[in-house]
């Protein structure tokens, strides 16, 4: 059994590691919308943080209940993430190429944002499978800390992206789409 401080430190470190893909996608979202209002920034970071909180808990529940069935599906997780990011990134590249007049890119919709959240948090699902020695309160605490860290990192990514998006103008959509595709390829190659 871990001490409270060891659990908290482990959770924060896990949060930083798991949040890197979400940070990159947040950066892309900031690039796309350089005039993004603060409420929208909090919404995007909240979606990523929420999925990073939810996925380890789902993994923990699976390990406690239906581990055998779930383990047979884990080989498909990188393919799902790759497919989602390829779709979103490809759409952004196409929109960026079509947008030759320098019009502002349209904001990502709720469905696209949820797909980004799922695609960038799938690796957090496997973290839940490793939390076998934790009770439900500890698992929830660890997942919550991971979500909070992800929220903060994503807010930073959006801020950086907004600043760079202003300078990159209409090329931000193409660049952002290519970044998402690259993240998808990385997930597929690394297996999660």
Image (cartoon, rainbow, N blue to C red):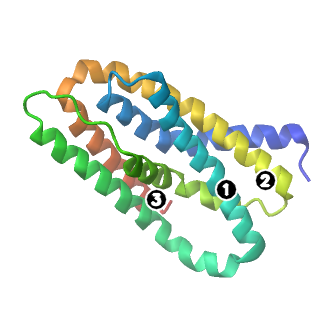
CA gap, disc 3 and disc 1: 19 Å
Residue at image coords 84%, 41%: 6
Q: Secondary structure at mark 2?
A: helix
Estimate how packed mark 1 is, as few (under 14), some (14 to 19) or many (20 or more) residues with alpha carbons within 10 Å: many
Q: Is 46 displayed left or right of 30 in the figure?
A: right
Q: Say if 122 sits above or below 6 in the image.
A: below
State if disc 2 and disc 3 touch (CB < 8 Å): no
Residue at image coords 20%, 24%: 169
Give residue 166's position: percent from left, percent from top.
27, 19
Query: What residue sits right under mark 3 in the picture?
Result: 190
Query: What residue sits right under mark 2 in the picture?
Result: 139
**Which circle, 3 or 2, is nearer the viewer?**
2
Residue at image coords 55%, 31%: 153
CA gap, disc 1 and disc 2: 8 Å
Q: Earlier in the sequence, mark 3 or mark 1?
A: 1
Q: Is 51 displayed left or right of 100 in the figure?
A: right
Estimate how packed mark 3 is, as few (under 14), some (14 to 19) or many (20 or more) residues with alpha carbons within 10 Å: few
Q: Earlier in the sequence, mark 3 or mark 2?
A: 2
Residue at image coords 49%, 42%: 22
State if disc 2 and disc 1 touch (CB < 8 Å): yes
Give residue 138's position: percent from left, percent from top.
84, 50
**Which circle, 3 or 1, is nearer the viewer?**
1
Q: Say if 78 sits above or below 161 in the image.
A: below
Q: Earlier in the sequence, mark 1 or mark 2?
A: 1
Give residue 107's position: percent from left, percent from top.
31, 36
Estimate how packed mark 2 is, as few (under 14), some (14 to 19) or many (20 or more) residues with alpha carbons within 10 Å: many
Q: Secondary structure at mark 3?
A: helix
Give residue 24's position: percent from left, percent from top.
43, 38
Query: What residue sits right under mark 1 in the picture?
Result: 56
Q: Say if 172 sits above or below 147 in the image.
A: above
């Amino acid at each position: 059994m871990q001490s409270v401080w060891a659990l908290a430190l482990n959770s924060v470190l896990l949060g930083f590691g798991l949040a890197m893909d979400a940070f990159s996608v947040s950066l892309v979202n900031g690039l796309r919308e350089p005039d993004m209002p603060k409420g929208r920034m909090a919404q995007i970071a909240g979606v990523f943080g929420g999925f990073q909180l939810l996925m380890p808990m789902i993994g923990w529940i699976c390990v406690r209940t239906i581990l055998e069935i779930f383990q047979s599906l884990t080989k498909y997780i990188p393919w799902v993430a790759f497919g989602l990011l390829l779709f979103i990134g490809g759409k952004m590249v196409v929109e960026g190429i079509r947008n030759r007049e320098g019009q502002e890119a349209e904001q990502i919709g709720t469905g696209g944002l949820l797909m980004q959240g799922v695609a960038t948090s799938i690796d957090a699902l496997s973290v839940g499978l490793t939390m076998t020695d934790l009770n439900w309160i500890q698992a929830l605490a660890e997942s919550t800390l991971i979500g909070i860290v992800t929220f903060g990192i994503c807010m930073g990514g959006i801020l950086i992206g907004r600043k760079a998006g202003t300078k990159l103008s209409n090329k931000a959509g193409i660049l952002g789409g290519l970044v998402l595709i690259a993240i998808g390829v990385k997930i597929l190659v690394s297996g999660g």
